[in-house]
Amino acid sequence: MSSSNQSGIIVSIVSIVVILAALVANYSIIEPMEIAAARPRPEDIFIVSYPKSGSTFVRLLLGHLALNGRQTGREGARQLDLQTIEDLVPDLEYGPNRRAYTQPPVSSKYINMPVRLFKSHQAFGFAYKPPCDKSIGSSNVEGFQCACPNCPLHMKRIVYVVRDGRDTLCSYFHFQKKLGEFAGQGAGEFTEFLEKDLNEALYPGVRWLEHTRAYWEQSRNASSDQDIYLVRYEDLRDPRTALDAATKLASWAGLPSDLESVIDALERSGFQKMRKLEEANGLKLFDRHYTGREADFRLTRKGVVGGWRDDPACQLPDEQTSEFIRSAGPLL
């Protein structure tokens, strides 16, 4: 064998060894370290809810308070929209955001925030039930929906947003249809949709009742080291209670809770303002990953309290409604 051939073989072997060493380092050292680093930090605040319960509104409310502090009404105050909120309050259901949690900030844009805020729909206590492995991403942190930091059992400060389940499921029904994720059949399609919820076939893989009850019960667990603050969407939307509910939430979060700051944040996060900004600026994640959705899909659909009553598509027989009310009890 010529010396040139021997050199070529040696180079190939060395290359293979280097590649194998890199793979071993990645799977045995780097990724475990990354997963450990992804454990939720005790000072972070996680805004959690079942889908379509009002978490976007709460993200905007707390995001404005954190971003603007007491600059309300002054030139330095900034207006968030449904694009920028994805950077300020990342959605941990999205794989790349879970990986980003472990990395230093790419930008100093929000470096002076008084607290880090994140959003999640992950169920409490159901960490490894499907669809844990349904996520956008490829590696451990990105590829598993329930991978830390999206792991509620380890979150220390949680805002759990509760909304009347009848409104929540009605809104989620329209959301899934417009997104192209659910195709029902005729007049009974809402009943069909609810059967998917009962069979845990809807994302995030846990029924609305189980999802909500688990957080509600944990918030009442006196022996827990978790601080779970329950806020009702209806209280934040009702003009008679919104200011008081938002002020108490801001105070719990350690954010500005003076009258001027809270009023400004409520106004900046209002439904009509967000609808106009959605029309003007679009939706960051949905524009990227759901290009096949219906043309009239809107994240800000109605946002009203009790809308299920006037929605012909969301009507159920009286006995089913009564059973839902009986099962939900104090969660409604």
Image (tube, grey):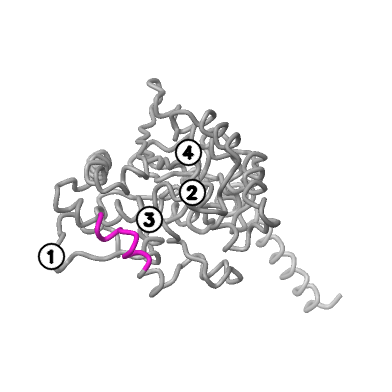
Residue 48 image position (x, y, % from top left): 43, 44
Residue 76 image position (x, y, % from top left): 17, 66
Please state, as top left, top right, bottom left or bottom right, where the N terminus lies in the image: bottom right
Residue 65 image position (x, y, % from top left): 24, 53
Tag nearer the camera, 3 or 2: 2
Residue 182 vs residue 54: left or right? right
Please state, as top left, top right, bottom left or bottom right, where the C terminus lies in the image: top left
Asked if residue 154 lies in the magenta stretch, the reply is: no
Dot 1 crowding, Cα within 10 Å, few <14, some 14–19, many 20+: few
Task: Indicate whether 128 appears above or below 108.
Answer: above
The residue identified by callout 4 is 152
The Cα atoms of the two marked residues, 3 and 2, are separated by 29 Å
Kind of residue indicated by mark 1: Arg
Mark 3 or 2, nearer chain start? 3
Asked if residue 268 lies in the magenta stretch, the reply is: yes
The residue identified by callout 1 is 74
Q: Secondary structure at mark 1?
A: loop
Q: Secondary structure at mark 3?
A: loop
Residue stretch in magenta = 266-275
Kind of residue indicated by mark 3: Val
Task: Indicate whether 121 appears above or below 84.
Answer: above
Q: Which mark is residue 308?
A: 2
Q: Residue at x 27, y 57 (%)?
A: 64
Q: Give the quarter of the image for residue 128.
A: top right
Tag nearer the camera, 2 or 4: 2
Kind of residue indicated by mark 2: Trp
In the image, farthest residue toward the top:
223
